[in-house]
Image (tube, grey):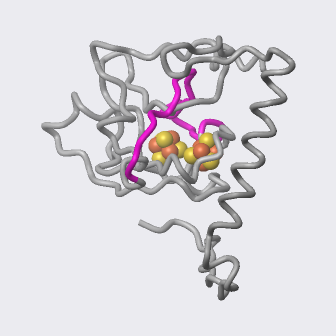
Amino acid sequence: MKLTNRSKVVSNKKMSLKEKLYLPAIAQGMGITLKHAVRNLVKGVPSVQYPEEQRPRAIIWRGQHVLKRDDEGRERCTACGLCAVACPAEAITMTAAERTKDEKHLYREEKYAEIYEIDMLRCIFCGMCEEACPKQAIFLTDRLVDVEMIRQNFVYGKDKLVEKIEQRIDISERQKKTY
Ligand code: SF4
Ligand code: SF4
């Protein structure tokens, strides 16, 4: 569901012959890579063997989002759309649904997000969604978004965003707002 009209359709400009060949751009890119590689070798800059090796991140790192559950395990999100409206990158979309009386143990509010998606390729990890949420339902965490080879896999749905009941995500440091 589209919640704002901020997005613009861009038209691709016509490419020149040089651009169509790609080779000059590839050579230019390789040149930059080589320049950095040589400079780092000369300076003895250590390499981090990511993902096996990771540098420590701050406890308030703005990484992959989590959709929180309350103490009883119910999803906190009420699909109000405020996070999507606040998002400068238009990365969030959702579809709301009414909770039935048999679903009271699943969703805290009468309305919930049947579909909730964040496009991680659009997201700039600014934290505005977290700021906008009146239900303390969405938080950024110190987790990194997985590497993917297919663009569509970067659109995270509820299966990846909602925390597992038996595997809660600690967001207490972000809640302190000491940053
Ligand atoms: S962190 Fe910022 S860009 Fe990413 S989904 Fe939230 S509001 Fe949008
Ligand atoms: S995460 Fe928060 S702001 Fe976003 S739709 Fe759910 S309740 Fe509203």
Residue 77 spot, x, y in % from top left: 42, 39
Find residue 54 and report its image quarter. top right
Residue 65 spot, x, y in % from top left: 50, 33
Q: Quadrant of the C terminus?
A: top right
Residue at 48 percent across and 15 percent down: it is 52
Q: In the displayed orientation, state which residue is furthest to the bottom.
A: 14
Residue at 86 percent across and 18 percent down: it is 43
Q: Is residue 87 part of the magenta span, yes or no?
A: no
What secondary structure prevails in the magenta region? loop
Residue at 41 percent across and 50 percent down: it is 155
Q: Quadrant of the N terminus?
A: bottom left
- Ligand 1 shows up in which quadrant of the image? top right
Q: Is residue 21 above or below residue 111?
A: below
Find residue 163 and report its image quarter. top left
Q: Which residue occupies the foreground of this view, 128 or 111? A: 128
What's drawn in magenta, residue-wise?
Answer: 130-150
Q: Is residue 11 left or right of residue 151?
A: right
Q: Is residue 140 part of the magenta span, yes or no?
A: yes
Find residue 151 and report its image quarter. bottom left
Q: Is residue 164 left or right of residue 19?
A: left
Q: Which residue occupies the foreground of this view, 1 or 14? A: 14
Residue 63 spot, x, y in % from top left: 58, 30
Q: Is residue 22 above or below residue 127?
A: below
